[in-house]
Image (cartoon, coloured by chain):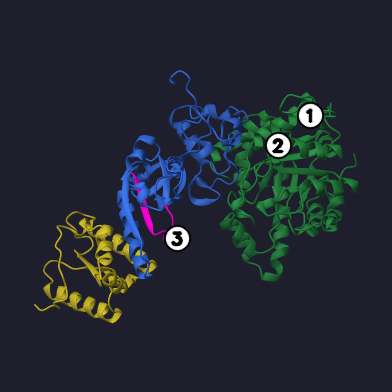
Chain colours: A green, B blue, C yellow
Amino acid sequence: MNQDIELKTPSKLEKILKLGHMAVTSECGPPRGSDADLIKKKAEIIKDYVDAINITDNQTSVTRLCSLASCIHLKLMGLEPILQMVVRDRNRIALQSDILGAASFDIHNILCLSGDHQSFGDNPTAQNVFDIDSMQLIQTVRHMRDEGKFLGGDNIIRPPKMFVGAAANPFADPFEIRARRLAKKVKAGAEFIQTQCIYNVPKFKEWMKQVRDMGVHEKVFILAGVTPLKSAGMAKYMKNKVPGMDVPDEIVKRISGVPKEKQAEEGIKICIETIQELKEVEGVRGFHIMAIEWEEKVPEIVKGAGLYPRPKV
Amino acid sequence: MIVASKKPIEEIIQSVQGSKRLLIVGCNECVTVCEAGGKKEVGILASALRMYFMNQGKEMTIDEVTLERQCDKEYLEEIKHMVPNYDTILSLACGVGVQFMAEMYKDKPVLPGVNTTFMGATLERGVWGERCAGCGQCILAKTAAVCPVARCAKRLFNGPCGGSTKGKCEINPNTDCAWQLIIDRLKALGRLDDYDELMPIKDWSKDRAGGPRIVVREDIRL
Amino acid sequence: MQYPPTIRIIRVPCTGKVDLLHILRCFEKGADGVYVVGCMEGDCRFKTGNLRAKKRVYQAKEILEKVGVGGDRVEMFNLSSGEGPKFAQIATEMTQRIKALGPNPIKGKLIKKAA
């Protein structure tokens, strides 16, 4: 990336990335109720160790406090939230409306996602929306920001200034199309990417090579996703029960090989080692640490990976 | 064709409870092909219901007839003289036929005997799969003749999502990932570069979302 | 070879010819039990006739159970054409089963109606 930085938004994440630093983001899952303190406490734990905080959007289709409200709470605490938005539950009217809602609180980061199918969550009998897909949502936010217009064509009063992100999964099938899909997201307007959590580093490297061969690594900031394993049970569950997840046998073996009380510690170790290895991969511009319901480990991971303190911009 | 499946007999028994003279009407087209409401299924259901109600000690006449189609007034008219002899009609046609029957025989309760599900085809004997969602604006030319609206669980136009595993959808290991199918076909046709094109946002006003639909051909109306 | 006189045999070229409707109509008209005897699985000269028959027998069981006649009144058996003694044994077994179950519950109601 050239040093002459052109900032499109007031986003702190954009600034850190464009200044050439390795960025660190993490995520918090909102509570299954209206007690905002629960999300604020999680954010407190990690705030000094990350540049921006994702708030998940009814993840796994389980109904929770909405991402938008949670982001507002974080913004009011002086933090940098990343609004995650899935296209499963809202049509283009509601999506644009919520984007404006976030922008009205000066929330400057958005991650555009498809969303897990509702059959996984607590309302499998619900209708789903999918009025537009995640790639079209990326285009929509860019359109609202850069053209200052709604999808319908009318002008927006005070257009949103959002740094637009998307997810990428190097481990889903078909593998041959995954780098091309990333290129498509970049063409649609994605400016930063958070990948699915990486356990299979060689496969990730293979994907990154394809990405570099297309020159895409220079057009978008790729943050490598990592998730610390809490136990051998978790490793096996993620390996066998989560679609699009790749947990190599060696990792399962390694964590199963230590006594139960030591497994969490081993999981953190694996996570830190993974980050260290990924730092060397050309095109990786930061890390997205997903430690859902284990947010208290984020400080340890960030410190252990040599990513603390975070740059002040 | 329209694919339907038989309603559970317990549900049908509940709905025809009050009847004393029941006419079960089958349809010779789609529901015959998917073995839910054709002449044979009418016979089976009639026999089963007769046994049930006899067992209950209830006096009930249950008769059978199968029409060529129930979505054409000409065929529905064929039973014009029979209908007055019954107090209830149980139609095993798809939802279209049931409603058309009710529109023709306004003073008779018309009950459905099948659950109409989708537009699809026979994959193998005993298995029918969904292929068309009737979105009103066919894009099959762009997706190598595999429909993402009907076959992708998330109706993605720029798929696959991150849940696609070994060619199967995240929601069910037996469901094909539509986008894997699209990519495979594009490859086979030497058109994988089409994949890189961003598909535009769908106009859902032509779909059911725009309201109940009607097709009018002024050029053939008298 | 002796087998109970309570059996009425209907011969078919292959049990694949037996339709679900045939089975149900027997019970509708008051039969106490119905059983289908086909060739050994894998030996059907029409390949899948006896497999289809089995499926239909099981469908019949389900329906008869739901309408209160009883699924045990219908059964599928397989034997090869040379097994005469087994044929007799099946006949005896089925007769005993039906006798234990009692008459078809709708029979009494049929007769009442006829009167």
Instruction: Classify residue B185 by image quadrant.
Output: top left
Q: Residue A93: x percent and y percent? A: 72, 35
Tell me what residue is drawn at x 35 percent, y 35 percent: B74
Going by the numbered disc 1, the residue's amino acid type is Arg
Label 1 residue SS: helix
Q: Which residue is the site of mark 2?
A: A283
- Whether residue A126 sits left or right of residue C69 in the image: it is right
- Which numbered mark, 2 or 3, is in the foreground of this view? 3
Q: Residue at x 77, y 43 (%)?
A: A83
Location of residue B212 in the rendering, given as x and y in whole percent from the top left corner = 56, 35
Closest to the camera, between mark 1 and mark 3, is 3
Quadrant for the N terminus of chain A in the image? top right
Q: Are marks 1 and 3 in contact (CB under 8 Å)?
A: no
Disc 3: which residue: B18
Q: CA distance from mark 1 to mark 3?
A: 63 Å
User: What's drawn in magenta, residue-wise?
Assistant: B6-27
Check disc 2 and report its element: helix, strand or loop.
Answer: loop
In what element is the residue under mark 3? Answer: loop
Say if residue B124 shows up in the picture.
no
Q: Amino acid at mark 3?
A: Gly
* Vertical placement of residue A270 versus C76, above or below: above
- Marks 2 and 1, the one that precedes in the sequence: 1
Asked if badges 2 and 1 are on one and the same chain, I answer: yes
Magenta includes B19? yes
Q: Which residue is mark 1?
A: A145
Q: Which residue is pictured at 37% across the width and 56% down the height?
A: B21
Instruction: State which chain disc 3 sits on.
Output: B
